[in-house]
């Protein structure tokens, strides 16, 4: 029973993080350009690269817990790369890798979540994940503006690392046997 809630907690936290990152740069394009020494259009490309890479959710893959954990880890590393980027190419590349890792984690995590709740009511899944998406999309610009104002634009990306580690740690707490039913290939959406 607890495995369901650990899986739901990990996936919901990851989805919240990914949704925040979809809109986090909307309010801070100019400060990002100034902080990184790049043009405003390059900052726009960094914002768009994340969204374009989310199309990776269409990638067919097997939903294993190692895929979810690896994708969350890659997201964290890409956040560090984006934070410490010294040129536009590294920032845009870091954001693109973040988006692709988010897409893979969403794809794998959703199937693992459905497998964990197999035979149970699925309304907690829909409510929790939908709430995380809404809060993330709406809160992204607010969060980005707050962090950029209080700390630095670079902290907007660096702040992604801790939630990624927490989401992975929650998911590691789910026994492997509980995710075994989710190893079938995912159908195309």
Image (tube, grey):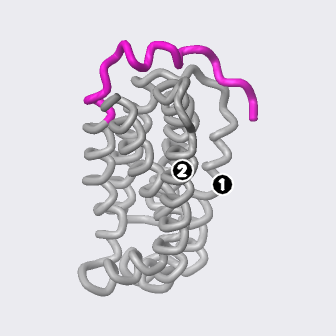
Q: Which residue is mark 2?
A: 99
User: What residue sits 55% from the left and 24% below the top?
Assistant: 119
Mark 1 and 2 residues: CB-CB less than 8 Å, in contact? yes
Q: Is 55 on the left-hand or right-hand side of 3?
A: right
Looking at the image, which is closer to me, 109 or 88?
A: 109
Q: Which residues are magenta?
A: 171-189
- Locate residue 110, reporting x and y percent: 55, 36
Q: Is 182 on the left-hand or right-hand side of 158?
A: right
Q: Is 86 on the left-hand or right-hand side of 104?
A: left
Q: Where the N terminus falls, by quadrant? A: top left
Mark toward the start of the polypeptide (1 vs 2) = 1
User: What residue sits 31% from the left and 38% below the top?
Assistant: 168
Using a 10 Å C-alpha cutoff, classify the residue at mark 1 as few (fewer than 14 neighbours), some (14 to 19) or many (20 or more): some
Q: Which residue is mark 1?
A: 52
Image quadrant assignment for residue 69: top left
- Locate residue 12, reporting x and y percent: 44, 49
- Locate residue 180, reporting x and y percent: 45, 13
User: What residue sits 44% from the left and 32% below the top?
Assistant: 68
Query: Residue 178 magenta-drawn?
Result: yes
């Amino acid at each position: 029973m607890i495995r369901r809630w650990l899986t739901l907690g990990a996936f919901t936290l990851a989805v919240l993080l990914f949704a925040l990152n979809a809109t986090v740069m909307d309010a801070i394009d100019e400060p990002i350009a100034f902080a990184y020494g790049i043009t405003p259009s390059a900052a726009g490309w960094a914002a768009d690269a994340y969204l374009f890479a989310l199309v990776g959710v269409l990638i067919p893959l097997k939903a294993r817990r190692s895929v979810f954990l690896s994708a969350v880890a890659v997201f964290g590393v890409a956040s560090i790369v984006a934070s410490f980027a010294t040129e536009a190419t590294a920032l845009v590349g870091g954001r693109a890798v973040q988006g692709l890792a988010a897409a893979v984690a969403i794809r794998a995590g959703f199937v693992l979540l459905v497998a964990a709740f197999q035979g149970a009511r699925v309304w907690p899944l829909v409510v929790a994940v939908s709430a995380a998406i809404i809060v993330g999309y709406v809160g992204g610009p607010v969060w980005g503006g707050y962090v950029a104002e209080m700390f630095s634009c670079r902290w907007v990306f660096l702040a992604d690392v801790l939630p990624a580690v927490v989401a992975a740690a929650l998911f590691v707490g789910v026994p492997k046997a509980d995710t075994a039913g989710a190893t079938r290939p995912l159908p195309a959406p």
